[in-house]
Image: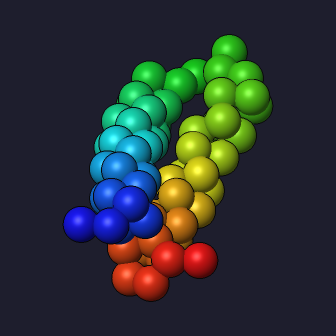
Amino acid sequence: MSGERLIGVVVLLVAAWQFYSFFRGFNTLRTKSNKGTTAFTIFGTWYGLLFAVILLGFGITFVLNGF
């Protein structure tokens, strides 16, 4: 296994963990949020999803053909 593919697999694992963290945080926000919930929490949750999608793209790129 080449170095780029190994890096790609590691990045894909981090992306999977980030998706899991997003869904766990989103479900917590959906069930336990109230008027005291700040906008920073909501934005942070959605930026976590964006970060996971970016990591997924980089991981797939590294695994398939690298830069």
Residue drawn at x 59%, y 51% is: 51
Return the x and y of residue 63 as percentages of the image width and height: 37, 73
> Viewer-proximal residue, 26 or 48?
48
Which quadrant of the view contains residue 28? top left
Query: As displayed, is residue 66 above or below residue 39?
Result: below
Lateral position of residue 59 relative to residue 34, left or right: left
Query: Visible in this render: residue 63?
Result: yes
Eyeballing the image, is 21 above or below 19?
A: above
Instruction: Say whether residue 46 is visible.
Output: no
Most distant residue in the left direction: 1
Residue at position x 39%, y 37% from top?
21
Determine the residue positioned at 53% across, 67% down. 58
- Residue 20 percent coordinates (x, y): 33, 43
Quadrant occupied by the C terminus = bottom right
Residue farthest front in this picture:
2
In the image, 43 versus 65, the foreground residue is 65
Q: Is residue 10 above or below residue 9?
A: above
